[in-house]
Amino acid sequence: MTIEQALLSFTVTAGLLTITPGLDTALVLRTAAVEGGKQALLAGIGICSGCLLWGAAASFGLSALLAVSGFAYSVLRIVGAVYLGYLGIKLVIRAFGSTSSISPAEAVWAENRNRDSSLWLKRGLLTNLLNPKVGVFYLSFLPQFIPTGVPVWSFSILLALIHATEGLLWFLLLTNATELISSWLRRRRVVMALDSLMGAILIAFGLKLVLDKAR
């Protein structure tokens, strides 16, 4: 496989994986619908930054530890599950626990007005980094597209950068599409449904991490 063939094959494959519905897409969509496009893009940047860090870890062989060490994998798995569960429960409580006369979306905006904007960046980054399966995925996925004779570290970073760029473009597209129907998405019942659905998804992913011990 030549360098050109490897880059083309990876770009197409990673692009298809990027647009496949999953936790990252759900997180960005919910954030865009309820908290605004800027916050959604920050969450997307955090997720893509996590991809770059996992790519760097894979190129150094650090993520190999997750594939061979049951203890290291289990620790990261439990921490990730707790974090996802915390975010999910918080969203469910927000969806059903508000008795205010203002809409849930207005309550979210008021709550977030004085917060540091880096909150959403950190949320996206931690959601990605605390998922050990992302590390194992990079370790098994990237080597398939590294031609013989190229510097492994730099080429791995290049592939991770391509994946992160595709992810960022996808999140930007989702955010812009969401803005077109933002007035409908921010209705009380819609926001409650989005928060409860996203909370359930996060809790489900957390439980899946707890129950799935296979590496």
Image (tube, helix red, strand yellow):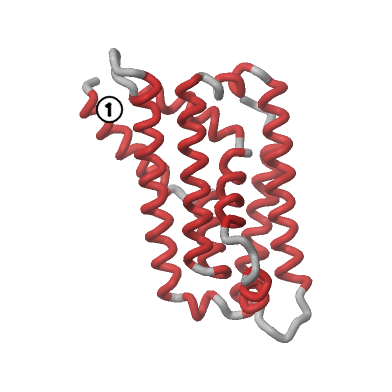
Quadrant of the snapshot with the C terminus: top right
Element at label 1:
helix
Quadrant of the snapshot with the N terminus: top left
Mark 1 burial class by Cα count in 10 Å: few <14, some 14-19, many 20+? some
What residue is shown at x 48% (from left), y 53% (from top)? 44
Does 118 appear above or below 165? Answer: below
Q: Looking at the picture, tell me which residue is in the foreground, 159 or 137.
A: 159
What residue is shown at x 53% (from left), y 54% (from top)? 43
Percent across and percent down for residue 211 are 72, 36
Asked where in the image residue 119 lies, by quadrant, the reply is bottom right
Q: Looking at the picture, tell me which residue is in the foreground, 146 or 12.
A: 146
Percent across and percent down for residue 30 are 56, 63
Does 188 appear above or below 157? Answer: below
Percent across and percent down for residue 175 are 44, 64
- Determine whether, in the image, residue 156 is placed left or right of residue 41: left
Does 16 appear above or below 95? Answer: above
- Determine whether, in the image, residue 202 is placed left or right of residue 7: right
Seen as rendered, the residue at the extreme bottom is 101
What residue is shown at x 24% (from left), y 25% (from top)? 3
Asked where in the image residue 212 lies, by quadrant, the reply is top right
What residue is shown at x 39% (from left), y 53% (from top)? 170
**Amino acid beneath label 1:** Ala
Give the number of marks.
Answer: 1
Asked where in the image residue 146 lies, by quadrant, the reply is top left
Does 75 appear above or below 91? Answer: above
Which residue in the structure is indicated by mark 1?
Answer: 6
Percent across and percent down for residue 130 are 63, 39
Seen as rendered, the residue at the extreme top is 149
Q: Looking at the picture, tell me which residue is in the foreground, 53 or 94.
A: 53
